[in-house]
Amino acid sequence: MPVRSSIGAVVLATVMVTTIAAARAHDETKYPDWSGQWLRTGGIQWDPTKPIGRGQQAPLTPEYQAIFEASLADQALGGAGNDPRYACLPVGMPRLMSVIFPMEFIFTAKTTYILFENNMPRRIYTDGRRWPDHPEPAFAGYSIGKWVDADADGRYETLEVETRHMKGPRTYEGSGLPLHEDNQTIVKERIYLDKTNPDILYDEITTIDHALTRPWTVTKKFRREYNPTWIENDCSEDNHHLAIGKEHYFLSADGRLMPAKKGQAPPDLRYFDQSKK
């Protein structure tokens, strides 16, 4: 019996030490208060200070400016243009941080999670890890972050993040403003609270991409809701847009396939029995 008691005491002590160490590793008093629900301010365009579409004045290369113009022309006729979101594909980074629907932050010792009402969670690893040698590309990419205590007051105020290893297709906004198809995009962010209003959050986003002639920096602004109502937002639910090959069609209210733009050819029906017409 004394032996069992001794073993039990050792196990209990080990568990307590481990628990205390874990608690110290994640000292919540060091982190800023980003609790609650965060909603975008302004419109859904990429740079919130400029109009959507051409008004963004994106620093695109001539090749990708032509792709953008073709997207706008197709949308003017009723098509989806270069925007893959109509088929409910994830928006990916950096468009994910336009926060079309609300987001929430969750801090842990090794990872900061950003939860979105209409997209998969985003993971930002803050444990000092290196970039993986053979990452699996994802729409949200792979994000490594670092908490910064710039004023040395013992509490972090800024989260610096770099995101790589994204896959496409991805655009900045619904106009089809494109990112390069090589998916070698690098996104750098600085996320922090307003110094005079803790209910305002900023995200300074710099995109480095081969479709751009220079890095492009915009600042997103969000407002806090302390008593939020979260809703289920599933893009595929009651989505009447339909992609067949490279064409965008539409389902009518009675479930029939219809064109999305004037003069659009029907899809290839070679695998259907045409004799039953």
Image (cartoon, grey):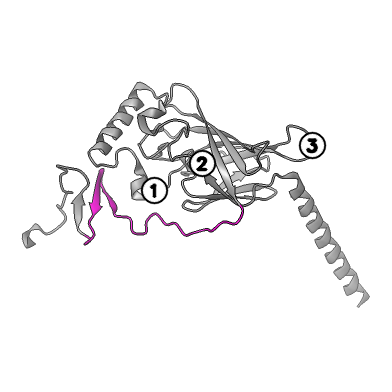
Q: Position of residue 2 (x, y in %)?
A: 93, 75
Q: Secondary structure at mark 1?
A: loop
In this rendering, is residue 30 above or below 16? Answer: above
Pick the front one: 61 or 138:
61
Q: Residue furthest bottom?
A: 1
**Residue 57: image location, x then y, percent:** 40, 25
Q: Secondary structure at mark 2?
A: loop
Mark 1–mark 2 Cα distance, whole angstroms, equals: 24 Å
At label 3, which amino acid type do we have?
A: Asp
Residue placed under numbered mark 1 in the picture: 89
Q: Quadrant of the N terminus?
A: bottom right
User: Who is closer to the viewer here, 45 or 116?
Assistant: 45
Query: Is residue 254 covered in magenta?
Result: yes
Type of secondary structure dominating the magenta stretch: loop
| Residue 6 vertical placement versus 262 (above, below) | below
Q: Residue 96 colored magenta? A: no
Q: Which residue is mark 3?
A: 153
Mark 2 is on which residue type?
Thr
Q: Is 67 left or right of 148, judged from the image as shown? A: left
Q: Position of residue 151 (x, y in %)?
A: 76, 32
